[in-house]
Amino acid sequence: MQLIVDLHLHSHYSRATSRDMNLESAYRYGKLKGINIIGTGDFTHPAWFSEIREKLEPAEEGLFKLKKQIADKIDSELPASVRNNIMRFILTVEISNIYKRHDKTRRLHNVIVASSFSAVSYLNEKLNVIGNLKSDGRPILGLDSYDLLKISLDSDPDTLFFPAHIWTPWFAMFGSKSGFDSVEEAFGDLANKIVAVETGLSSDPFMNWRIADLDGRTLVSNSDAHSPRKLGREANLINAELNYKDIIGAIRTNDDRFVGTIEFYPEEGKYHFSGHQKCGISLSAKKAKDLKFICPKCGKKLVLGVEQRVDELADKPFDYVPNQHKVVEYIVPLEIIIADVLGVKSVNGKSVQEEYLNMINHLGDEFNLIRKVDLKDVERVSGAKMALAIDKVRKRDLIIEPGYDGVYGVVKIFSQKNTAENQLSLLI
C-alpha cells in the first residue's frame, strides 16, 4: 500500500512549539490530512517518552497506535470521511549537536528513528550521561555528529539516522554558517552509513540532484512541525507493508518502494533566498553574488540562502535532472487555498475553518483532496473558484514570494492585481 510518512516533528516539550503538539492532536490532524505514519518526535525527553509509553501501544512490528479508549473518543469527533484512515506512530527524535571540529564550531541537527521502546531506552541512557535530556524536547548535546551516529547504530542496527534539513544556514550538515562541505567531512569513515538526508523546507529534490555527494542517498522530506496544522507540509510517499522494517527499508535502499516526496515549495522556506531580515533585503543567488554577498542597505554580510549554498557545492548544472528519479509533488495546504479563495488573510478565521471541515466532510482527507479528487466534485461542494484554485495548485500555476533570512516565503493563488480574470504568474 502507498503510505504517506512524516518522520520529523516535535512535541510540546520542544522550544517554540505549540502546547497542542501532543499525541492526540497528531492523531487528529494525521487523519484529517491523510498521513499514515507520524513520528513521535522528542523521545529523548523523559516526560514525553513516559507519555508515549502511557498513551501508545504496539501495533504492527515497530509501529504504534493510540490506545483504543483515546482513539475512539477522537474518532467520534472526526468527520466520517476520515475516521477509518490508517494512522500509526513511529519513534523519532531530532538532536541538536554543537561541537568543535577543525577549530570551528559546528551546529548540526540530526534525526533518529528507532524500532522499539527498548532501543529508545538504551539510547536515552547513553545520551543522558552526555547532556541534559530534560532541558528540551530537542536536546542540545556537545557531541560530535559522528559519535551520535555511532551511538545510535549501537543502540539497534535497525535504527535509521539522517541529517536534518541539510541546507539550513545555522544548524545543518551543509549549512553555510556552521556545517561541512561533504558528507565524508561531517561523518568520516561512517559516511556510508548516511543512507538518507532530509532536504528541508528551503530546498527540493531538483536542487539536491545537483550535488554528486548525494547521489545514491535517499532524499527524504518531512514537516519539522511545531504545531499540529503544520504536519505533512512535507512528507514521503512509500509503497510498503505496514511495518517498521519495510518502511525504513524503503528509505535505506532507495529502491522502488520509495516512491518520492511531497514538497513545500522551496521558495516558501525561510532561508531560500539570501538576504537581511532587519533590512528587508531579499536577493536571488545571482543578485547576491553580484553584490559580493554584502547587504546594499547596511553594508554587512548577507545571510546566504539555500539557493546560494547549493550553487556553491553543486557539481551539476542548474537544470540537471537524472534520467531516472523519484516522484516530486508540490502542495499548498488546504487552509491556505481556502483563505486565498475567500479573500481573507488568516487561516484561523471561522470562515476558513468551517469551509475546511465542509470540504473534508464531503471530499475526504486533505492530501487526497488536493492531489486526486475530481475537480467537478470540488466545484459541486465548494464552488467553481475553489475548483479553479486546486487546479492551479496541481499545475504549479502560482505566485511565490521567496523567503529569506528567517522570513517564510508567501504563496498566492490568485493575483491581487488581476483577480477578476484569475490570471496568475509562475515565479520559480
Image (cartoon, rainbow, N blue to C red):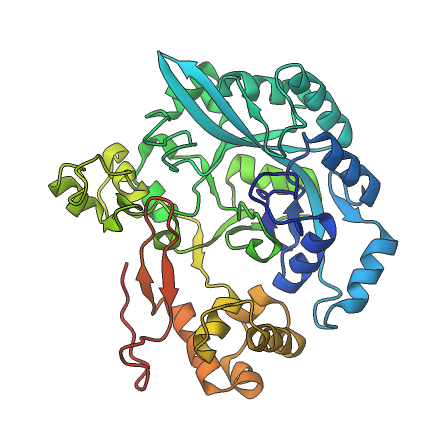
In the rendered image, which quarter is residue 166 located in? top left
Query: How far from the left and from the top, in percent, is residue 78?
Result: 74, 68
Residue sitting at x 70%, y 33%: 115
Q: Is residue 228 left or right of residue 89?
A: left
Residue that lies at the very extreme toward the top in this rendered image: 103
Q: Is residue 298 left or right of residue 218?
A: left
Position in image of residue 361 (x %, y %): 67, 76
> 75 or 170, which lies in front?
170
Q: Residue at x 51, y 85 (%)?
A: 379
Residue 406 visible somewhere in the drawing:
yes
Relative to 137, does residue 319 appear above or below in the rendering? below
Q: Which quadrant is home to the C terminus?
A: bottom left
- Relative to 108, residue 296 above or below: below
Instruction: Check the image and report above or below for 77 versus 88.
Output: below
Q: Position of residue 212 (x, y in %)?
A: 32, 33
Q: Is residue 324 visible?
A: no
The quarter of the rendered structure image containing the N terminus is bottom right
Name the residue furthest right.
Answer: 69
Q: Residue at x 55, y 35 (%)?
A: 252
Quarter-of-image position of residue 353: bottom right
For image coordinates 57% across by 78% down, the residue present is 351
Q: How many marks?
A: 0
**Residue 276 vs residue 352, the one in the foreground:** 276
